[in-house]
Image (tube, grey):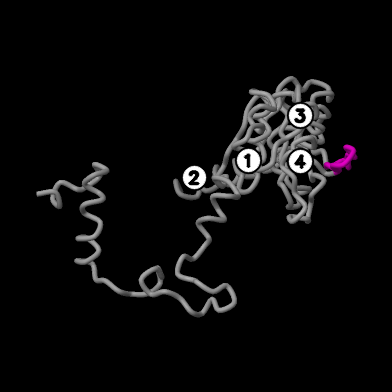
Amino acid sequence: MKIKTLLSVVLISSLFFMSASLSYAQSNPRYIPLGSATGVLYTPDSGVYSHVGIIQSHPTSNNFGCGTAWASRRFMALCLNNRYFNNETAIRWETIILDIRAGINFIKTQPGITKVVLLGPSGRGPLVTFYQNVAENGPSVCEGLNKLVECDPNTLAGLPRADGIILNDGIPGYGVNAVTEINPAVFNERRPDLVKPNLDPLTPRMDITQTVLLLTPIASRLGILPHSLSE
Protein backbone atom coordinates (compact mmCIF):
# COMPACT_ATOMS: atom_id res chain seq x y z
CA MET A 1 0.00 0.00 0.00
CA LYS A 2 2.83 2.37 0.92
CA ILE A 3 4.55 1.64 -2.40
CA LYS A 4 1.36 2.40 -4.36
CA THR A 5 0.93 5.66 -2.45
CA LEU A 6 4.53 6.65 -3.08
CA LEU A 7 4.24 5.90 -6.80
CA SER A 8 1.04 7.95 -6.99
CA VAL A 9 2.76 10.93 -5.34
CA VAL A 10 5.74 10.67 -7.71
CA LEU A 11 3.46 10.43 -10.75
CA ILE A 12 1.33 13.40 -9.72
CA SER A 13 4.44 15.47 -8.95
CA SER A 14 5.96 14.59 -12.33
CA LEU A 15 2.81 15.60 -14.16
CA PHE A 16 2.65 18.85 -12.23
CA PHE A 17 6.23 19.86 -13.03
CA MET A 18 5.81 18.75 -16.64
CA SER A 19 2.70 20.87 -17.10
CA ALA A 20 4.39 23.82 -15.39
CA SER A 21 7.39 23.48 -17.69
CA LEU A 22 5.20 23.30 -20.79
CA SER A 23 3.25 26.35 -19.72
CA TYR A 24 6.43 28.40 -19.81
CA ALA A 25 7.79 26.88 -23.04
CA GLN A 26 7.85 28.84 -26.27
CA SER A 27 5.56 27.57 -29.01
CA ASN A 28 6.22 30.40 -31.48
CA PRO A 29 9.85 31.66 -31.54
CA ARG A 30 10.42 34.89 -33.48
CA TYR A 31 12.92 35.32 -36.30
CA ILE A 32 15.10 38.38 -35.67
CA PRO A 33 17.21 39.97 -38.46
CA LEU A 34 20.28 41.69 -37.02
CA GLY A 35 22.19 43.07 -39.98
CA SER A 36 24.87 40.57 -40.92
CA ALA A 37 23.59 38.19 -38.24
CA THR A 38 20.26 36.47 -37.77
CA GLY A 39 18.62 35.25 -34.60
CA VAL A 40 15.64 33.43 -33.19
CA LEU A 41 14.12 34.82 -29.99
CA TYR A 42 12.53 32.43 -27.50
CA THR A 43 10.22 33.83 -24.82
CA PRO A 44 7.94 31.88 -22.47
CA ASP A 45 4.37 31.79 -23.79
CA SER A 46 3.20 33.00 -20.39
CA GLY A 47 5.00 36.30 -20.99
CA VAL A 48 6.71 35.96 -17.62
CA TYR A 49 10.49 35.70 -17.73
CA SER A 50 13.66 36.50 -15.81
CA HIS A 51 15.37 39.88 -16.09
CA VAL A 52 18.46 37.97 -17.29
CA GLY A 53 18.63 37.49 -21.07
CA ILE A 54 20.53 34.55 -22.59
CA ILE A 55 22.54 34.66 -25.85
CA GLN A 56 24.08 31.67 -27.57
CA SER A 57 26.15 31.83 -30.75
CA HIS A 58 28.84 29.80 -32.51
CA PRO A 59 31.47 30.78 -35.08
CA THR A 60 29.95 28.51 -37.74
CA SER A 61 27.24 26.21 -36.38
CA ASN A 62 23.47 26.66 -36.38
CA ASN A 63 22.09 27.85 -33.04
CA PHE A 64 18.44 28.43 -33.94
CA GLY A 65 17.10 25.63 -31.72
CA CYS A 66 18.91 26.63 -28.54
CA GLY A 67 16.11 28.42 -26.72
CA THR A 68 13.36 25.88 -25.98
CA ALA A 69 14.83 24.67 -22.68
CA TRP A 70 15.62 28.22 -21.56
CA ALA A 71 12.07 29.41 -22.30
CA SER A 72 10.70 26.46 -20.32
CA ARG A 73 12.71 27.75 -17.36
CA ARG A 74 11.37 31.31 -17.67
CA PHE A 75 14.29 32.84 -19.55
CA MET A 76 14.32 34.87 -22.74
CA ALA A 77 16.95 33.42 -25.07
CA LEU A 78 18.40 34.74 -28.32
CA CYS A 79 19.83 31.98 -30.53
CA LEU A 80 22.24 33.78 -32.83
CA ASN A 81 23.78 32.76 -36.16
CA ASN A 82 26.59 35.11 -37.14
CA ARG A 83 27.86 36.25 -40.56
CA TYR A 84 30.14 33.22 -40.94
CA PHE A 85 27.45 30.60 -40.33
CA ASN A 86 28.35 27.39 -42.19
CA ASN A 87 31.50 28.97 -43.66
CA GLU A 88 34.44 28.14 -41.41
CA THR A 89 37.14 29.09 -43.92
CA ALA A 90 35.88 32.70 -44.02
CA ILE A 91 35.96 33.42 -40.27
CA ARG A 92 37.56 36.67 -39.16
CA TRP A 93 37.63 36.89 -35.38
CA GLU A 94 38.14 40.63 -35.64
CA THR A 95 34.65 41.08 -37.13
CA ILE A 96 32.68 38.09 -35.87
CA ILE A 97 32.28 39.63 -32.42
CA LEU A 98 30.42 42.55 -33.96
CA ASP A 99 27.50 40.14 -34.36
CA ILE A 100 27.65 39.34 -30.65
CA ARG A 101 27.45 43.09 -30.04
CA ALA A 102 24.33 43.27 -32.21
CA GLY A 103 22.76 40.44 -30.19
CA ILE A 104 23.51 42.11 -26.86
CA ASN A 105 22.21 45.48 -28.03
CA PHE A 106 19.00 43.84 -29.25
CA ILE A 107 18.18 41.74 -26.21
CA LYS A 108 18.83 44.69 -23.89
CA THR A 109 15.99 46.53 -25.61
CA GLN A 110 13.47 43.83 -24.64
CA PRO A 111 11.09 44.78 -21.83
CA GLY A 112 12.35 43.77 -18.41
CA ILE A 113 15.83 42.63 -19.47
CA THR A 114 18.53 44.24 -17.33
CA LYS A 115 21.31 41.63 -17.52
CA VAL A 116 22.81 39.57 -20.36
CA VAL A 117 24.63 36.24 -20.08
CA LEU A 118 26.61 34.68 -22.94
CA LEU A 119 26.70 30.91 -23.34
CA GLY A 120 29.97 29.24 -24.28
CA PRO A 121 29.58 25.48 -24.78
CA SER A 122 32.03 23.71 -27.10
CA GLY A 123 33.37 26.01 -29.85
CA ARG A 124 31.32 28.90 -28.52
CA GLY A 125 33.71 29.24 -25.57
CA PRO A 126 36.53 31.03 -27.45
CA LEU A 127 33.97 33.26 -29.18
CA VAL A 128 32.28 34.62 -26.07
CA THR A 129 35.50 34.92 -24.05
CA PHE A 130 37.20 36.83 -26.87
CA TYR A 131 34.20 39.15 -27.09
CA GLN A 132 34.18 39.78 -23.35
CA ASN A 133 37.92 40.33 -23.26
CA VAL A 134 37.68 43.07 -25.88
CA ALA A 135 34.56 44.53 -24.25
CA GLU A 136 36.22 44.76 -20.84
CA ASN A 137 39.78 45.68 -21.82
CA GLY A 138 39.41 47.41 -25.17
CA PRO A 139 40.76 46.64 -28.65
CA SER A 140 44.35 46.72 -27.37
CA VAL A 141 44.00 43.04 -26.45
CA CYS A 142 44.02 42.18 -30.15
CA GLU A 143 46.62 44.71 -31.27
CA GLY A 144 50.40 44.70 -31.29
CA LEU A 145 53.36 43.06 -32.98
CA ASN A 146 52.68 39.77 -31.20
CA LYS A 147 49.36 39.34 -33.05
CA LEU A 148 49.24 37.56 -36.41
CA VAL A 149 46.19 39.63 -37.38
CA GLU A 150 45.39 42.88 -35.63
CA CYS A 151 41.88 44.14 -35.07
CA ASP A 152 40.58 47.56 -36.00
CA PRO A 153 40.57 49.67 -32.83
CA ASN A 154 37.92 52.01 -34.21
CA THR A 155 35.50 49.22 -35.10
CA LEU A 156 35.80 47.34 -31.80
CA ALA A 157 35.88 50.28 -29.42
CA GLY A 158 33.10 50.56 -26.87
CA LEU A 159 31.62 47.04 -27.09
CA PRO A 160 28.87 46.56 -24.48
CA ARG A 161 29.91 44.11 -21.80
CA ALA A 162 27.99 40.98 -20.99
CA ASP A 163 27.08 40.62 -17.32
CA GLY A 164 28.15 37.00 -17.20
CA ILE A 165 29.46 34.04 -19.18
CA ILE A 166 28.62 30.35 -18.83
CA LEU A 167 31.42 28.11 -20.12
CA ASN A 168 29.83 24.67 -20.13
CA ASP A 169 32.45 22.35 -21.61
CA GLY A 170 33.92 25.03 -23.88
CA ILE A 171 37.05 24.18 -25.86
CA PRO A 172 40.33 25.90 -24.84
CA GLY A 173 40.69 27.52 -28.27
CA TYR A 174 40.78 26.65 -31.97
CA GLY A 175 44.56 27.02 -32.14
CA VAL A 176 45.03 24.71 -29.15
CA ASN A 177 42.65 22.18 -30.67
CA ALA A 178 44.53 22.25 -33.97
CA VAL A 179 47.87 21.59 -32.24
CA THR A 180 46.50 18.66 -30.24
CA GLU A 181 45.08 17.12 -33.39
CA ILE A 182 48.45 17.03 -35.18
CA ASN A 183 50.08 13.60 -35.30
CA PRO A 184 53.84 14.17 -34.92
CA ALA A 185 54.55 10.71 -36.35
CA VAL A 186 53.32 11.69 -39.82
CA PHE A 187 56.24 13.07 -41.84
CA ASN A 188 54.57 13.12 -45.27
CA GLU A 189 51.07 14.59 -45.49
CA ARG A 190 50.51 12.73 -48.76
CA ARG A 191 51.29 9.41 -47.08
CA PRO A 192 49.71 9.55 -43.63
CA ASP A 193 49.96 5.76 -43.48
CA LEU A 194 53.74 6.09 -43.16
CA VAL A 195 54.70 7.10 -39.65
CA LYS A 196 57.73 7.30 -37.41
CA PRO A 197 57.13 4.54 -34.84
CA ASN A 198 59.04 6.33 -32.08
CA LEU A 199 56.61 9.28 -32.35
CA ASP A 200 53.43 7.34 -33.00
CA PRO A 201 51.20 7.23 -29.90
CA LEU A 202 49.35 4.23 -31.35
CA THR A 203 52.44 2.08 -31.77
CA PRO A 204 52.81 -0.35 -28.82
CA ARG A 205 56.45 -0.13 -27.81
CA MET A 206 56.69 -0.33 -24.03
CA ASP A 207 55.08 -2.28 -21.21
CA ILE A 208 53.76 -0.77 -17.99
CA THR A 209 57.12 -1.09 -16.23
CA GLN A 210 58.87 0.89 -18.96
CA THR A 211 56.12 3.49 -18.86
CA VAL A 212 56.52 3.97 -15.10
CA LEU A 213 60.29 4.25 -15.42
CA LEU A 214 59.85 6.87 -18.15
CA LEU A 215 57.28 8.98 -16.31
CA THR A 216 58.72 8.74 -12.78
CA PRO A 217 61.40 11.46 -13.17
CA ILE A 218 58.89 13.79 -14.82
CA ALA A 219 56.22 13.22 -12.18
CA SER A 220 58.78 13.66 -9.42
CA ARG A 221 59.84 17.07 -10.73
CA LEU A 222 56.20 18.14 -10.96
CA GLY A 223 55.54 17.00 -7.41
CA ILE A 224 52.71 14.66 -8.43
CA LEU A 225 54.47 11.33 -7.87
CA PRO A 226 52.57 8.90 -5.62
CA HIS A 227 54.39 8.31 -2.32
CA SER A 228 54.77 4.58 -2.98
CA LEU A 229 56.71 5.25 -6.20
CA SER A 230 58.95 7.98 -4.78
CA GLU A 231 60.51 5.63 -2.20
- Identify the residue at image location x=24%, y=71%: 207
Along the viewing direction, whichever of 129 and 15 lies nearer the viewer: 129
Closer to viewer: mark 1 or mark 2: 1
> For the residues marked 4 and 1, what is the alpha-carbon distance in whole angstroms?
15 Å
> For the residues marked 1 and 2, what is the alpha-carbon distance in whole angstroms?
40 Å
**Which class describes the residues within 10 Å of circle 4: few (<14), some (14-19), or many (20+)?**
some
For residue 201, what is the image quadrant? bottom left
Judging by the rendered image, the residue that carries numbered circle 1 is 120
> For the residues marked 4 and 3, what is the alpha-carbon distance in whole angstroms?
11 Å
SS type, badge 1:
loop
Judging by the rendered image, the residue that carries numbered circle 2 is 6
Residue placed farthest to the front in the image?
145
Residue flagged by tag 2: what amino acid is it?
Answer: Leu
Q: Is residue 34 left or right of residue 215?
A: right
- Mark before the other along the chain sequence, 3 or 1: 1
For residue 136, what is the image quadrant? top right
- Identify the residue at image location x=46%, y=65%: 184
Closer to viewer: mark 4 or mark 1: 4
Q: Give the magenta part as a residue range.
A: 28-39
Estimate the x, y position of residue 81 in percent, counting from the top left. 79, 45
Judging by the rendered image, the residue that carries numbered circle 3 is 156
- Mark before the other along the chain sequence, 1 or 2: 2
